[in-house]
Amino acid sequence: MTAGRYAPSPSGDLHFGNLRTALLAWLFARQSGREFVLRVEDIDSERSSPESAARQIEDLSALGLDFDPPVVYQSQRGDLYQAALDRLPVYECYCTRRDIREAAAAPHAQPGMYPGTCRNLTEEQRASRRSQLAAEGRLPSIRLRATADAYVVQDYYHGEVVGAVDNVVLKRGGNVNQAQAGDWAYNLAVVVDDGEQGVDQVVRGDDLLSSAPTQGYLARLLGYAEPQYVHVPLVVNAAGVRLAKRDGAVTLRDMGLEAAWPELVRSVGCAGAASTSELLETFDPAGLPPEAWVWEG
Ligand code: GLU
C-alpha cells in the first residue's frame, strides 16, 4: 500500500492553518492515487484528549476529506514503539530541560540540538546519575545514539534537504508520579507509524522541515523506506507569525464552513472551487505559492 497521511495532535480544535495543511495532504495523496490515513498523535498524555480527537475528525469530515480506515491512535501503539526502540542504538539521558539549555548555550554547541552531555558517560557515572534521579523521583529519557552528523532527504518543494541529525529523545523520562512519565516521543512514533502504515508521502507544515533529516535517518536505521517529503508553507497572521488560537476566530467552528471554505480553496490556488472533487481536478501542486499564506480572517 502507498499512502499519504494527516497526523494532528488532539490538543484543541484545528485552526485554519491546520485545515489547510490537511487539505493539501489529502489533495497530494488523492491526486497521486494514494490511500489517505488519519493518525491521531495523542502520545502526549497531558495535552491530548479523546474529545479533541473526535472534534478534529468531525471537522475534517465536514470539509469533505475522506480517510481510509482504520484511524490509528498513537496512544495504543506502545508495543510497536518498544519493538522499534529495542532495535535502535540508544543511551539514557539524565538532563533536565535546564541542563540542556545551559549546555546548549556553550559556544561550540549547535543551536536546537542536544549538546551530547550524557552520550559518553562511563558506567559509574551512569549509575550515580541514575540513583540521583531516582531519589528525585525522575526517570531518565532515552535518546538516539546517532552515528551520522548529517542526512539528506528529498522534498517536493525544497529539493535536496541536508540537515543535522540530532540525538533526539525517543522515550521521555519525566516524573515517576506524573501522568506523562515514560511517554513515547514524537520523532520515534512518527517514523514507526509512517513505516508501519505504508506512508510513502509526508505532507505537513514546513515548521517540521528541520526534523526531516533526523526522521529520514531514523527510518533508514529501522529499515523503512524513506517517504517523499512535501513541506508546505504555514499560515501566518498579519504580523507574519504562525497562526494560533490567540489570533481570534481561527477554527472551523469559529469561522463556519461558509466563511472557511472560500478562503481555504483560495489559499491553495483554486479560488472558486465548490467541492473537493472540483479541487482534485484543478489543484496544481507546482502552483502553490511558496511563501506563507497570510490569514485575513
Ligand atoms: N502531530 C504533529 C503536529 O500536529 C505533526 C507531525 C507530522 O506531521 O509529522 O504538529
Image: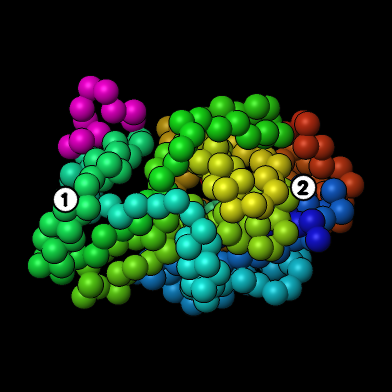
Q: Is residue 110 magenta?
A: yes
Question: What is the magenta range?
Answer: 102-111
Q: Nearer the viewer, residue 41 or 108?
A: 108
Q: Is residue 247 left or right of residue 36?
A: left
Q: Which mark is residue 28?
A: 2
Question: Looking at the image, is 157 positioned above or below residue 55?
Answer: above
- Residue 5 % position (x, y): 68, 57
Q: Is residue 267 left or right of residue 135?
A: right
Q: Residues within 10 Å of mark 1 (few under 14, many from 20)?
A: few
**What is the quadrant of residue 102 in the picture?**
top left
Rendered residue at 64%/52% (across/down):
223
Q: For the residue labelled by badge 1, is the local secondary structure a helix, a strand or a loop? A: helix
Q: For the residue labelled by badge 2, is the local secondary structure a helix, a strand or a loop? A: helix
- Residue 266 % position (x, y): 71, 41
Rendered residue at 30%/74% (across/down):
179
Q: Is residue 112 left or right of residue 63?
A: left
Q: Residues within 10 Å of mark 2 (few under 14, many from 20)?
A: many
Mark 1 residue type:
Gln
Q: Nearer the viewer, residue 193 or 252?
A: 193
Q: Is residue 126 magenta?
A: no
Q: Which mark is residue 125?
A: 1
